[in-house]
Image (cartoon, helix red, strand yellow):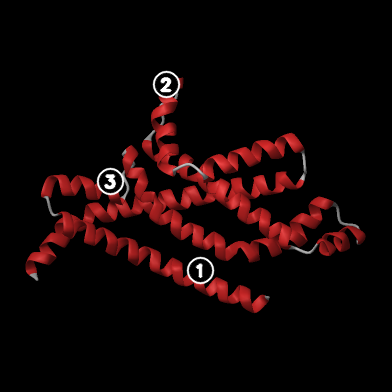
Amino acid sequence: MDVILGKIATLGPPLLLGAVTTVTITLVSLIIAIILGLTLALIQRARITWLNWIIAAYIELFRNTPVLAQLFIIYFGLPYLGYKIPSFLAAVIGLGLNGGAVLAEVFRAGIAAIHVGQREASLSVGMTPWMAMRYIILPQTWRMTLPPTGNYAIALFKDTAVVSAIAAPEIMFYARTLVASTFETAFIYLLVALIYFVLAFPMARLVDRLERQQRAWL
């Protein structure tokens, strides 16, 4: 037991430091993804053909290519154009752009699920289309899309492991560094899995609660 506790005391702090970076990357990427996804979903409502084609191409491109390849293009490709960016920034941009494509479809479906009569009723009482969207449609859309957005947040948290490939200092980056210096492979990755579980489990329970609330509202 003393040996195990000693290993935890030695290996734990660097992994916890990486976990802080992992959570930060997740939060920043999620904010980018939500803002971008909602913006694209609203733009699609304008039904401007050429703009919708561009948005559709973006969504299909980012949804159907590996996020690791996207990160490599951003981190290693941009320097060829004269733009060298830090690994942390490349990570949040890459994950944010990928998440924006995913959530754009979530929000688009959520907006489409609101009965058209609610928009018509809003316009009939003197609201502008923007007011109807802001005060009537979007609040209901957000309530409906909270569970899938929460599930995406959990998946994003776990997917941050890939950013270690571009040297972003998150938990897997520190784990690989510790493995190379201590050769405690199984123990280190067991600690990593435990840290991921401790952080992700409350998120999963919150999403379950939101899904139950949504079923009750419906």
Amino acid found under the numbered disc labelled 3: Phe
**Label 1: few (<14), some or many (≥20) within 10 Å?**
many
Proximity of marks 2 and 1: CB atoms separated by less than 8 Å: no
Position of residue 140 in the picture relative to residue 4 (left or right): right
Which secondary structure, mark 3? Answer: helix
Q: As drawn, which residue projects farthest toward the front? A: 64
Res 166 → quadrant: top left
Q: Earlier in the sequence, mark 1 or mark 3?
A: 3
Residue bearing mark 3: 173
Which residue is rendered at x = 34% and y = 53% of the image?
20
Q: Earlier in the sequence, mark 2 or mark 3?
A: 2
Residue 208 on image: x %, y %: 50, 72
Q: Which mark is residue 207?
A: 1
Q: Which residue occupies the foreground of this view, 171 or 66?
A: 66
Residue bearing mark 2: 80
Which residue is rendered at x = 17% and y = 58% of the image?
186
Residue 73 on image: x %, y %: 43, 32
| Quarter in which the N terminus is drawn | bottom left
